[in-house]
Amino acid sequence: MIQFNEISNEQRRQLTDARQVFQAYKDTQIEYDRRFTGSMRWAERKGKEYLLRKISSSETSLGPRSVETEASFSAFERGRADIRDRLKSLTKRLDEMAPVNKALGIGRVPKLTARIIRRLDEAGVLGRNIIIAGSNALFAYEMSAGILLSADIVATGDVDLLLDTRRGIRLAVQQFKKEGVLGLLQKVDKSFEVRMHRDFRAINRDGFFVDLICPEDKNFMSSGTPEKLGENDEDLYGSPIGGLEWLVNAPKIEQVVIGDDGYPLRMLCVDPRVYALHKRWIAQRVDRDPVKRVRDSSQAKLVAMIATKYLGLDIDGHDLSALPEELRSQAAYLIADGNNGNDDALTPKW
C-alpha cells in the first residue's frame, strides 16, 4: 500500500513563506554577484589617481579621478552596503524559519543530499549540466503536489546525478572546472573518494555514495567514451546507461524543497510523467534486479498519480510526443492501473 498525507494548511503556509524568503535571497545573491563582485579602490599611477575595479585576480582601470568616477565609486560602495544588509536580513530570516520548518515536518531532503545539491547550484551546473535523478526526485514531486510520501518510498542512501555534456560549463565557474564533481563533494564531506580511476561512484566514510550517470547514446558523448565535467583527471566519469538520453531530452521541472536541516534548496528534475514512464520501462526489463523492479513499479504508479491527479498533467500528453514509442507506450499501462481499482492503494491514510 502506497501511503502519503496531504500537507496541512499550517505546513502549506510555512512552505509558501519559506519559498518566498528563499527566492528573495537567491535573487539578491544573483544581483550581488552580478553587480558587486570584487572591489573598487583608488590608486596612484604616474602622478594621477585612478579608480580600479578588481574581480578575482584581474584588476582594470575605470579612469582617472573625476566627478564621474567618484560618483561610480560612491554608488558601488553604497549599493554594495545596501545589498549586503538585505542579504544579512534574509539570511537571518532563513535561520529563524529553519527550526520551524523542521518542527512542522516539511524538511524532507536528507541533510547530506541537500548540501550536495546546494553546492551544485552554487557552482552553476545544476539544471545546466546536471539534473537530479533517481529516488531523490520524489522530494520535488511531493512538494509540487503538496503531499508527504511515506518514508519507505523516499528512503535512499545515495544521490544519482544525471550528466548532460551537450552544453559546456560556463566560463564563470572556473573553480568547478578545475576541481570537478569530486572536488565539490569533498567540500561537503572531505571523506568522499572515488573508488578507482575513471569510476562513476564516490563514497564517503559512512557508505553514502554519489553516482554520476550519463546517456549511453554516443551522440551525448563527444569522444565516444564516458564523460566528466571538470578538468580534474581524478574526477568522476559518467557511467553510460541505456535510455537516459530520453531523460536528458525530456522536459524538466524546478521546485524549491526543504532539507531536513530546515533550509530550502532548488531541485531540477525531469517532468514527473517522464519519470513515471521511464520507471515502468525499467521495471519491465528482464535484466532488472527483481528487488529493484518492485520498487520501480511502485514509484512509477505513485508518480503517475501525482502527475495526473495532483498536477493535472496528461501522462499521454501531446507535449511528450517527442519521446520514443517504447517509452510512451508505458502510459497505457499506467492509465489502466489507475482505472482498475488501484486508486484505493493511492488514497491518503489519515
Image (spheres, grey):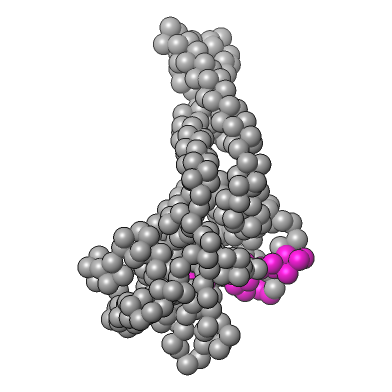
* Residue 255 picture location, percent across and down: 45, 52
Pick the residue in front: 107 or 244.
Answer: 107
Which percent across, then down, holds residue 123? Answer: 54, 49
Quarter location, residue 202: bottom right
Above/below status of 146 relative to 80: below
Quarter of the image for residue 314 reads: bottom left
Query: Quick check: can you spot residue 156?
Result: yes
Q: Is residue 258 above or below residue 305?
A: above
Which residue is located at x 35 percent, y 81 percent?
340
Q: Residue at x 25, y 68 (%)?
A: 317
Q: Is residue 55 magenta?
A: no
Residue 213 covered by magenta stretch: yes
Range of magenta residues: 196-216
Residue 165: where, in percent of width, then height? 44, 64
Number of disc labels = 0
Residue 210, by quadrant, is bottom right
Residue for point 47% across, 92% down: 286
| Residue 57 or residue 283, whichever sits in front | 283
Q: Position of residue 350 (x, y in %)?
A: 53, 61
Looking at the image, residue 283 sits to the left or right of residue 113; the answer is left
Return the residue found at the far front.
350
Q: Is residue 96 found left or right of 124 in the rendered image?
A: right
Q: Is residue 194 left or right of residue 211?
A: right
Q: Residue furthest top?
A: 67
Which residue of the protein is positioned furthest toward the left in this rendering? 318
Residue 81 lies, with reference to residue 10, above or below; the image says above
Residue for point 57% across, 15% down: 42
User: Can I make out residue 19 in this image?
Assistant: no
**Residue 208 position (above or below residue 59):** below
